Amino acid sequence: MISRFGNITAALLIFTTLPPLTMGQHSGRVVLMKPWIILIFDDQRIQFDAGMLAGDFFGQLERRKTAKGELFYIHSKSVSDYPKSVTVRLFANRWERGDTPFDKRWGGTTSALMDTLQFKAEWKTGLDMRPVSKMAVRHLERNEIAANVLSAYELTISSEGVPLTDHLVVSVYGPASSLVVRFSGSP
């Protein structure tokens, strides 16, 4: 019973000290993608998270719930689709807050995994998934990321003609095509 209570307490502390990563949640111009995950390696723990950007698009986007469903506006003008492209940035940060109930153990070192990641991106409408039409992946250089970030990737994804009601799902794979994490986000 104490163990279960300890896990619940740890989960509550984590959720109250970290920014919430829920669909439709913005941090300025960034749509926060869920879930964040803690990976435990032989050498250290990392927090892996992602955010979706498109210039000022998401920062200006307003969602209104109406009798017809959710509608989107920018400066009082109706908007129905994502811009031509979106950028997803994935970050690996050192985690020093101890174990969580959501940890995922991963053998080897952090750098061995981070240097071999592969990505798959899909648009989700309801339960239907379809691959993105075009995606470019770039491992960011050390001088392009903050000092506390261990590693980062940038995915540029074609989104022209994609309805704002669709979710972007990004799957991250390690060696032998093993799934590391799957992020999902929508405005």
Image (cartoon, rainbow, N blue to C red):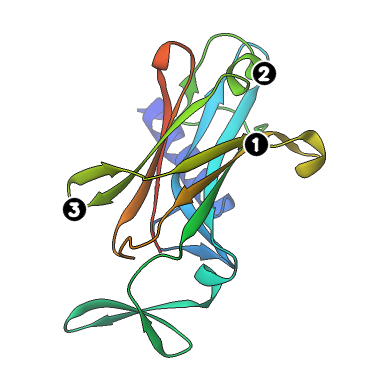
Element under label 2? Answer: helix
**Residue denoted by label 2:** 111
**Residue denoted by label 3:** 126
Element under label 3? Answer: loop
Q: Is residue 13 visible?
A: no
Q: Amino acid at mark 1?
A: Ala
The vertical placement of 149 against 118, above or below, is below
Left/right placement of residue 109 relative to residue 50 reads right
**Residue denoted by label 1:** 152
Q: Amino acid at mark 2?
A: Ser
Q: Position of residue 31 (x, y in %)?
A: 49, 59
- Disc tally is 3
Element under label 1? Answer: strand
Residue drawn 63% across and 14% down? Answer: 112
* Quadrant where the image shows the C terminus: bottom left
Residue lying furthest bottom: 76
* Quadrant where the image shows the N terminus: top left
The first of marks 3 and 1 along the sequence is 3
Tell me the distance, in whole angstroms, between the alpha carbons under discs 1 and 2. Answer: 11 Å
Residue drawn 40% across and 16% down? Answer: 177
Which quadrant of the view contains residue 115? top right
Q: Is residue 114 visible?
A: yes
Foreground of the two, 5 or 47: 47
Residue drawn 66% across and 20% down? Answer: 44
Left/right placement of residue 165 relative to residue 13 reads left
The first of marks 3 and 2 along the sequence is 2
Q: Position of residue 139 (x, y in %)?
A: 65, 33
The vertical placement of 153 against 174, above or below, is below
Q: Amino acid at mark 3?
A: Gly
The first of marks 1 and 2 along the sequence is 2
Which quadrant of the view contains residue 176? top left
